[in-house]
């Protein structure tokens, strides 16, 4: 049972990293560490800013949809 739990935990880690879901958690941890009094954006605002930055970067290519 422990081996299965470990494998599932690792799979969850890789899925979160691959999908970008863990980026918000890292951002919040970084913000809390460096300036605990600063407001942290909501996940929705964070994802919107991240998408805007990705679309504004010409190295990322053209996004049609």
Image (tube, helix red, strand yellow):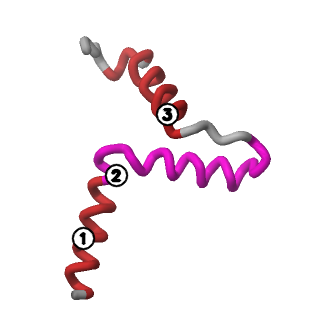
CB-based contact (under 8 Å), mark 2 and mark 3: no
Residue 37 on image: x %, y % = 79, 47
Q: CA distance from mark 2 to mark 1?
A: 14 Å
CB-based contact (under 8 Å), mark 3 and mark 1: no
Tell which circle, 3 or 1, labels the residue nearer the N-terminal end. 1
Q: Quadrant of the C terminus?
A: top left
Does the magenta run of residues contain 63? no
Kindly report which numbered mark, 2 or 1, lies closer to the viewer in this rendering.
1
Tell which circle, 2 or 1, labels the residue nearer the N-terminal end. 1
The residue that appears at 28% across and 15% down in the rendered structure is 63
Residue that badge 2 annotates: 17
Res. 44 mark: 3
Residue 47, above or below 59: below
Q: Which residues are magenta?
A: 16-38
Residue 27 on image: x %, y % = 55, 46
Secondary element at tag 2: helix
Horizontally, residue 34 falls left or right of residue 25, namely: right
Residue 56 figure quarter = top left
Tell which circle, 2 or 3, labels the residue nearer the N-terminal end. 2
Q: For the stretch drawn in magenta, what is the main secondary structure?
A: helix
Q: What crowding class fits label 2: few (fewer than 14 Cα within 10 Å), some (14-19), or many (20 or more)?
A: few
The residue that appears at 72% across and 50% down in the rendered structure is 34
Q: What crowding class fits label 1: few (fewer than 14 Cα within 10 Å), some (14-19), or many (20 or more)?
A: few
Q: CA distance from mark 2 to mark 3?
A: 18 Å
Residue 1, above or below 27: below
Residue that badge 1 annotates: 8
Secondary element at tag 3: helix
Q: CA distance from mark 3 to mark 1?
A: 27 Å
Kindly report which numbered mark, 2 or 3, lies closer to the viewer in this rendering.
3
């Amino acid at each position: 049972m422990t081996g299965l739990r470990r494998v599932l935990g690792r799979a969850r880690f890789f899925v979160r990293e691959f999908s970008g879901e863990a980026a918000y958690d890292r951002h919040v941890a970084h913000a809390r560490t460096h300036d605990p009094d600063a407001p942290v954006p909501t996940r929705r605002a964070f994802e919107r800013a991240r998408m805007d930055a990705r679309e504004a970067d010409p190295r990322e290519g053209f996004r049609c949809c």
